Amino acid sequence: MLHASNTIRNTIEKGNTYCYKNIDYDNEIRVLKVYPGLPGSAIICCLLPCPLVDQTLQPALPSSIPYAALSYCWGSDEAVNKIYFLETDKVYTEWKGPNKNALDGMVRTKMVSCLLVGSSLKDALETLRSRSKEAVFLWADALCINQKNLVERTAQVSRMHDVYTQAETVYIWLGTGKDEGKAEDPGKGKDEAKRDNTGKDQDEKNRKTLAFLTKILDLHELEMVVKRLEEREANANWLEDKQDCKRTIELMGAQWFSRRWVIQELALARSASVLFGNCEMPWRDFADAIALFMTKFDQIKAAFPAPKNYAALRTSEDRYINSLDAKALGANVLVTATSNLFRKSSSGRIIQRLLSLELLVSSMLLAFEATDPRDTVFAVLQIAKDISPRNFSPHRHSIIFRRSAAETLSYTVPILGIILWTLYDNSLTLTGDYKANYRKCLKDVCADFIEYCIENSNSLDIICRHWAPLPKPPAKVDMPSWILPISGNAFGGPAQAKKGRVHGDSFVGSEKGGFYTASGSRTPVFKFGK
């Protein structure tokens, strides 16, 4: 008996042991049920199937599970944190008996497995679990989608619109604040810096940061902050204001704001809240505060003068703020971008998409990166005006009718059935049916995007823009000369943005300003050798 228990425990300790159960991934999602637990204890969950419906066509089904969607940054750290999974919800009730020891209790059920996740997701789950004495229901892509099943992953990505519009709310996880890119104060010892960056000290810093953003929603308060910064030594509170501004600038550079997927996740949310450690703020208030803060950014930067002495400049932790370009602050770019994506109703539902796929990928969203380079295109499909999301096409019902008619007629009039089916196939292609396909390599995804842009715009401008993502090392991709890498962009891509401008603007400009028309109204002639 002891040997069997040790065998199961050893299997768990090795790493990913969870085996996903099949779902109808075209019409269902998995919802993560996170059971309550004490801080620092094992995170125990269960994945439950949930029907996914088009919110514009029908209400939620009785079997639907109310859930919140989690928007977070996967991060570059290794996935070493164990999330434990029970095979069924019933197992938790059986385990929650007299013996409360988590691992021993679960091992006895012989129905436990685990998945490894990065620290960002682990911290988010732990924080959300601690906010309630009851189980919480979440949707998190890393756990709710079988990432190794490319067919499922492709199908689920095509339903992202429904995933986020069906969610009751979206939690934006900005991290615990411990490692949000903050420079260490050279004057502090390691022990002191560690105390400042953990536990209650960090919670207090997070609270102050969001409290400051809430305060400056009052424009008069923001004006007073700027006035005190300009007067400096003449005002006793200017150093406190300076620290508030510094913490805000650091938060605006958090890695979450550079993720390409967050644009879609945020734009499609009916409501959203920012979570910074244990502190929370409504997204709309957060976005308004950031927008107001940026109106005074030049005056605020002046409170962080660069030291004139070179040695002091190298050791100053504030040296980067004075030379910081507003475009390098991810929060500012995100707030600006998301405000221009849609026209929305008062209830938060999308009335009209405003920007094309070409503009989103090659101009508007260059500051945002993706873990998988193919997501440079796939992550914005659901928010482009010229791409009809699944179940949102105005011709959906007529398409279904034509498909049914074609299948029926194919039994009685084969030739006519083939013709109708061909027309159906072509109609999808001509109306912009561009879908995510993770079975394609990066080179093919980029080539498909170029071809789509030229066919859709009747312009060759896209081949003059630097937009294409670079493959993740150690992978190497031999791109054609007409697919220009983002490294040649004005700001050199997301990783280089904080260093400022490195190149001139694209010769053809952005699609928003109109297409370049050196050839007048002549239609471009092109051929892809596929």
Image: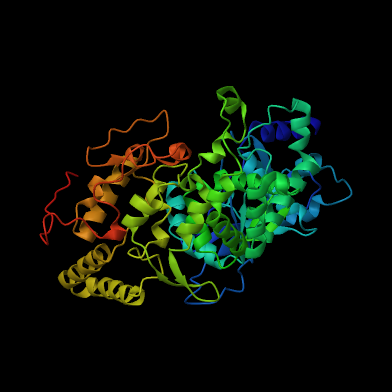
Query: Is 250 drawn above or below residue 387 in the view shown?
Result: above
Residue 503 seen in the current view: yes
Query: Is 43 drawn above or below residue 188 in the view shown?
Result: below
Query: Does 89 sit left or right of 230 as displayed?
Result: right
Determine the residue positioned at 44% across, 67% down.
342
- Residue 311 in percent (x, y) is at 58, 22
Q: How many marks are shown on the rendered structure?
A: 0
Query: Is 314 drawn above or below residue 289 in the view shown?
Result: above
Residue 254 lies in quadrant: top right
- Residue 324 in percent (x, y) is at 51, 41
* Residue furthest front in the image: 234
Query: Does 337 sit left or right of 455 as displayed?
Result: right
Quarter placement of the C terminus: top left
Residue 120 lies in quadrant: top right
- Residue nearest the viewer, comparing 210 with 479: 210
Residue 86 seen in the current view: no
* Residue furthest right in the image: 98
Residue 514 lies in quadrant: bottom left
Determine the residue positioned at 47% across, 58% down.
336
- Residue 29 in percent (x, y) is at 54, 59
- Residue nearest the viewer, comparing 107 with 53: 53
Query: Does 488 sit left or right of 422 as displayed?
Result: right
Quarter placement of the N terminus: top right
- Residue 357 in percent (x, y) is at 34, 58
Colour scheme of the rendered structure = rainbow
* Residue furthest top in the image: 311
